[in-house]
Image (cartoon, coloured by chain):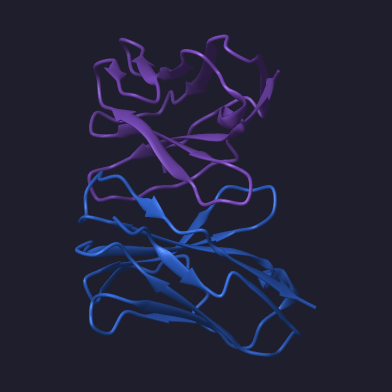
Amino acid sequence: EAGVAQSPRYKIIEKRQSVAFWCNPISGHATLYWYQQILGQGPKLLIQFQNNGVVDDSQLPKDRFSAERLKGVDSTLKIQPAKLEDSAVYLCASSLSEGPYEQYFGPGTRLTVT
Amino acid sequence: DAKTTQPNSMESNEEEPVHLPCNHSTISGTDYIHWYRQLPSQGPEYVIHGLTSNVNNRMASLAIAEDRKSSTLILHRATLRDAAVYYCILRLNNNDMRFGAGTRLTVKP
């Protein structure tokens, strides 16, 4: 079974530029998550989708971050404009459905904002 | 949010058992106890979870206190590959998963 795919793996941008990350979850998984992990900290949930609907985006900085999952499969996370403090690893995860199911994580995208 | 408390770091010798503690004194009756681990430069991976009874799987065992205010993840024979950050997480049925800082486990050969 293929795992969660993410691209790119690494990205370096200057502040005030925009960037987009892509995630392809495990086939058949209805729930998709985006996390932000700052160096030395645990992952922080940014947004959760159930199929193509948003379940929880309470921790998403909506003035600069946006995410979509148009057909209930792939998802993109965008930052516009980026700030220095956005430097982090962005992790995508998926699970079979809502509920205390196991979450499967992708390898993440390491973003450096200079 | 229900919170967990874990030691920042622990050390173990290879092929010896490791007991990773977690305190969760504010746990509610519907919170599941989940453990994930994160190897260097990888995303977290699921280890084990439980509600009230002790649980075993191929990776580890989870011992849950009778009052559920604490739990212990047990790795029966640590290997170098088990060196990782281990996260203890309380989860409600709604799938909410909030990570803390975790315990960094170092395994010495």
Q: Which chain is purple?
A: B
Residue A19 placement, left or right of B50: right
Residue A82 x %, y %: 66, 82
Residue B77 or A54: which is nearer the viewer?
B77
Residue B54 or A62: which is nearer the viewer?
B54
Q: In which quarter of the image is the N terminus of chain A?
A: bottom left
Residue A44 or B30: which is nearer the viewer?
A44
Does residue B31 lie above or below B69 as drawn? below
Residue under the point 33% across and 77% down: A74
Residue under the point 27% across and 75% down: A73
Does residue A85 lie above or below B91 as drawn? below
Residue under the point 42% across and 44% down: B1
Residue A90 x %, y %: 55, 65
Does residue A1 lie above or below B80 as drawn? below
Chain A, colour shown: blue
Image quadrant assignment for residue A54: bottom left
Image quadrant assignment for residue B51: top left
Residue A6 x %, y %: 47, 69
Q: In which quarter of the image is the C terminus of chain A?
A: bottom right
Residue A84 x %, y %: 75, 74
Does residue A69 lie above or below B22 as drawn? below
Image quadrant assignment for residue B53: top left
Residue under the point 37% across and 58% down: A3
